[in-house]
Image (tube, grey):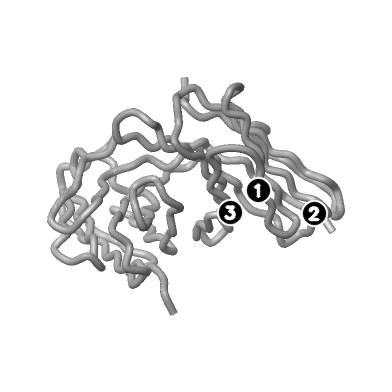
């Protein structure tokens, strides 16, 4: 069983739709990260969360520490949002980093 | 411009040869990391370094080696002992171990 599970694995949306990507984890964490990977392979860090909610432009990330769950929301989706979104956590015990397998998002014009 | 660079972007090697992947950052970050990405799998940590002249094994360190002689540089050597080296390799850095990570563009290694 993976320590970090994401859903859905693949997601296709029409431009303008509201999108939600979910992440559940099974370990105690010090921080959770949302990353974006474009087709060329480069990865960009979108958010780092340890509690609550963060917003950047059309992107919103929330985390519920008690439920061990985080969501990434994209409002008014656009084709340029098409990418793989990866959830990752820093374990608060030892020196462990855990990554989800990613959610592949395609936004159709 | 501050950032993290990896070279080369694509690398081809014959089986049995060692190969070194470069990672350089000018962000003045103390921590640096090497990850491996395979299709359908999440990133897996190979090695990380929290400070110059110190590094720790990650989950899949076998067949790899690293050095951290300078704060800016964290090269990864893929040795002939690595049984399945063909993969996409990503380097990252952060201010401290639990801070936001900044990723390089990656190196795609193909062993023929």
| Residue drawn at the location 56% of the way across and 46% of the way down | A34
Where is A33 relative to B95, above or below?
above
Residue at mark 1 to residue at mark 3: CA–CA distance: 10 Å
Q: Residue furthest bottom?
A: B1
Q: Quadrant of the N terminus of chain B?
A: bottom left
| Residue drawn at the location 28% of the way across and 58% of the way down | B30
Where is A66 relative to A71, above or below?
above
Where is residue A80? Give x, y as percent: 72, 62
Q: Residue furthest front?
A: A52
Residue at mark 2 to residue at mark 1: CA–CA distance: 18 Å
| Residue drawn at the location 17% of the way across and 66% of the way down | B70
Residue under pointer 1: A54
Neighbours of disc 1 within 10 Å: few (<14), some (14-19), many (20+): some
* Element class at badge 2: loop
Residue under pointer 2: A77
Residue under pointer 3: A46
Numbered disc total: 3
Q: Residue furthest top?
A: A1
Label 1 lies in what chain?
A
Q: In the rendered view, does A47 fall on the left or right side of A75?
A: left
Neighbours of disc 2 within 10 Å: few (<14), some (14-19), many (20+): many
Along the polypeptide, which appears first: circle 2 or circle 1?
A: 1
Label 2 lies in what chain?
A
Along the polypeptide, which appears first: circle 3 or circle 2?
A: 3
Along the polypeptide, which appears first: circle 1 or circle 3?
A: 3
| Residue drawn at the location 81% of the way across and 46% of the way down | A13
């Amino acid at each position: 069983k993976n320590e970090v599970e994401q859903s859905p694995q693949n997601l296709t949306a029409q431009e303008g739709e509201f999108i939600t990507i979910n992440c559940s984890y099974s370990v105690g964490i010090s921080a959770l990260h949302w990353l974006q990977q474009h087709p060329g392979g480069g990865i960009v860090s979108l958010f780092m969360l340890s509690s609550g909610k963060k917003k950047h432009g059309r992107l919103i990330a929330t985390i519920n520490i008690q439920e061990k769950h985080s969501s990434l929301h994209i409002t008014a989706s656009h084709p340029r949002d098409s990418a793989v979104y990866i959830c990752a956590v820093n374990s608060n015990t030892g020196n462990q980093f855990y990554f989800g397998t990613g959610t592949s998002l395609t936004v159709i014009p | 411009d501050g950032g993290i660079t990896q070279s080369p972007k694509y690398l081809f090697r014959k089986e049995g040869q060692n190969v070194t992947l470069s990672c350089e950052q000018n962000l003045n970050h103390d921590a640096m990391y090497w990850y491996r990405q395979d299709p359908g799998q999440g990133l897996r940590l190979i090695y990380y370094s929290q400070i110059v002249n110190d590094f720790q094994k990650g989950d899949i360190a076998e067949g790899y080696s690293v050095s951290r002689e300078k704060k800016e540089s964290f090269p990864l050597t893929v040795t002939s002992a690595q049984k399945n080296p063909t993969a996409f390799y990503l380097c990252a850095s952060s201010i401290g171990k639990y801070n936001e990570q900044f990723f390089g563009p990656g190196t795609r290694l193909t062993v023929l």
